[in-house]
Amino acid sequence: MSVSKICCIGAGYVGGPTMAMIAHKCPNIDVKVVDINETRIAQWNSDTLPIYEPGLDEIVKGCRGKNLTFTTEIDAAIKEADMIFISVNTPTKTFGVGAGRAANLEYVEKCARRIAEVAEGHKIVVEKSTLPVRTAEAVKRILSNASNGSTFDVLSNPEFLAEGTAIEDLLDPDRVLIGGERKEAIQELVDVYAHWVPTDRILTTNLWSSELSKLTANAFLAQRVSSINAISALCEATEADVDEVAAAIGTDSRIGPKFLKASVGFGGSCFQKDILNLVYLCEYFGLPEVAQYWEQVVRMNDYQKERFVSRMVRTMFNTVSDKKIAIWGFAFKKDTNDTRESAAIYVVRDLLLEKARVCIYDPQVTKQQVIQELEYVLSEGDNGISPAKRELIDNHVTFASSCEEASSDAHAIAVLTEWDEFAEVDFGKIHDSMKKPAFVFDGRNRLKQKNLVDSGFEYHGIGF
Ligand code: NAD
Ligand code: UGA
């Protein structure tokens, strides 16, 4: 039997693009992406998709109305599908046992229960969300109590796409990983991907190796960023240049050149949450030394963000109070509108606590989104946001529609996202419009150009 109908529960940054790619590459498979969030589904059905991702529009618009549907009719889609992907969010728990570390599996469990309740016949259930190792055990137990006597295979198929390059990554993945038990079920999913991925890049493992490989991959990637960021602090103290160090070590084929860009700190919805989850798992399985080892990757990242602001304050004569700081970029990386765990949130928060006035420009992030992030990060638990902190947001945060506008009359620029357009502006003109001395704090080392200094800026990058 080959799969002809797929349902994906969760129309987010993963569910939307991955299912659009399956629909695009497998015209004979009918793909339905379902979600409880009506607004999100309406956006997927509109001209403006909920996610900014280069190349996504063309693919979605090419398949929508043919073999790709976005709908809130979850039960109907579960019933008719041969294969059901669970691609819901798995955020860090904020309450109860494991708060601040463990993954909140409430949404995954709810999906499994819904499937158990409405499914008919045999289904292949695929874990697409990032999950702690051994989650499939719980999913299988829930499914074994299905109302209609349905039967199930459970597979793990973690997603490795990165935001901003999701379409490239899906088109040409380094590998697709499928973990499972029954060979025939694994083969069904292999056959879906084999429509466009060379079979030698489709790896199959047991369930637990697949689940654990996803957390491990993110932990290793984040560890590289924290490692080079740790060295960036030492570079600043010793006149070594972190980009030169990265290039020098990256030529060693055992180390490799990728993912060695020093920065203001990694962000995104997954690195921190997945490492904290790994830390929690290690503690749960009685491995405190292993837990501490990985936790340090997150600590180093926090240190890097704090260090960036203290350097700004120190350089600007030990005060930024009432100074205007232009914030270039708020997304956690370029080519996405995602701000989850962006380093910019923490940098702006700390600048506000220093009573600076910030003027924010990001080509894809809305004002409402920035305000939401700042309200969250400035809130004090259940007590919400204090009047003093509310005042900081109301009176110290403004928005601009270009980086030139943000910088006008500013004492400094902080570059927090590496948007390409930031390297193409007229720095002479911007310098003229700023207070002097005009500082640039480049949290991405992308403007590391002689012309910035030639234009009169005092330039500070990361790690030199
Ligand atoms: P997201 O928050 O963008 O989307 C999740 C969607 O699931 C939301 O729209 C939500 O409304 C929906 N949902 C939650 N519970 C539901 C339910 N019971 N029924 C129907 N819909 C429900 O999350 P995301 O970024 O797409 O991440 C999803 C998973 O994929 C996470 O486990 C994440 O760790 C993993 N992942 C994310 C990325 C990434 O780049 N964002 C990459 C690889 C893996
Ligand atoms: C990351 C992984 O790269 C994906 O493989 C994985 O699927 C995904 O997490 C996930 O599980 O969610 P993503 O977070 O979208 O993808 O983006 P990355 O390109 O990994 O960047 C993460 C953060 O690290 C960004 O803030 C980026 O600016 C920063 N970074 C990255 C650096 O500071 N330096 C680098 O050299 C690379």
Image: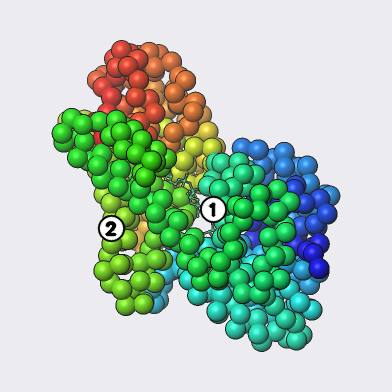
Q: Going by the image, does 160 lie left or right of 386?
A: right
Q: Is the residue marked by circle 2 packed among few (<14), some (14-19), or many (20+) residues within 10 Å?
A: some
Is any part of residue 170 visible from this angle?
yes
Residue 191 location (% of width, % of height): 72, 59
Residue beneath disc 1: 160
Asked which colour scheme the image uses, the reply is: rainbow
Residue 384 location (% of width, % of height): 39, 61
Residue drawn at (39%, 54%), measured in percent from left and top?
A: 220
Q: Which mark identifies residue 149? A: none
Helix, strand, or loop for circle 1? loop
Residue type of the residue flagged with mark 2:
Gln
- State yes or no: discs 1 and 2 in contact (Cβ < 8 Å): no
Q: Is the residue marked by circle 1 packed among few (<14), some (14-19), or many (20+) residues within 10 Å?
A: many
Helix, strand, or loop for circle 2? helix
Of the image marks 1 and 2, the number of the one nearer the N terminus: 1
Residue at mark 2: C-beta within 8 A of ligand 2: no
- Say which of marks 1 and 2 sits in front: 1
Residue at mark 1: C-beta within 8 A of ligand 2: yes
Residue drawn at (62%, 47%), measured in percent from left and top?
A: 170
Residue 185 location (% of width, % of height): 70, 70
Residue type of the residue flagged with mark 1:
Phe
Q: CA distance from mark 1 to mark 2?
A: 23 Å
Is any part of residue 344 visible from this angle?
no
Q: Which of 394 and 66 lies nearest the eye of the viewer?
A: 66
Q: Quadrant of residue 2?
A: bottom right
Q: Is residue 395 above or below residue 390?
A: above
Q: Is residue 130 above or below residue 394?
A: below
Q: Is residue 22 above or below residue 282?
A: above
Residue beneath disc 2: 296
Residue 23 location (% of width, % of height): 75, 51
Quarter of the figure with the C terminus: top left
Quarter of the figure with the N terminus: bottom right
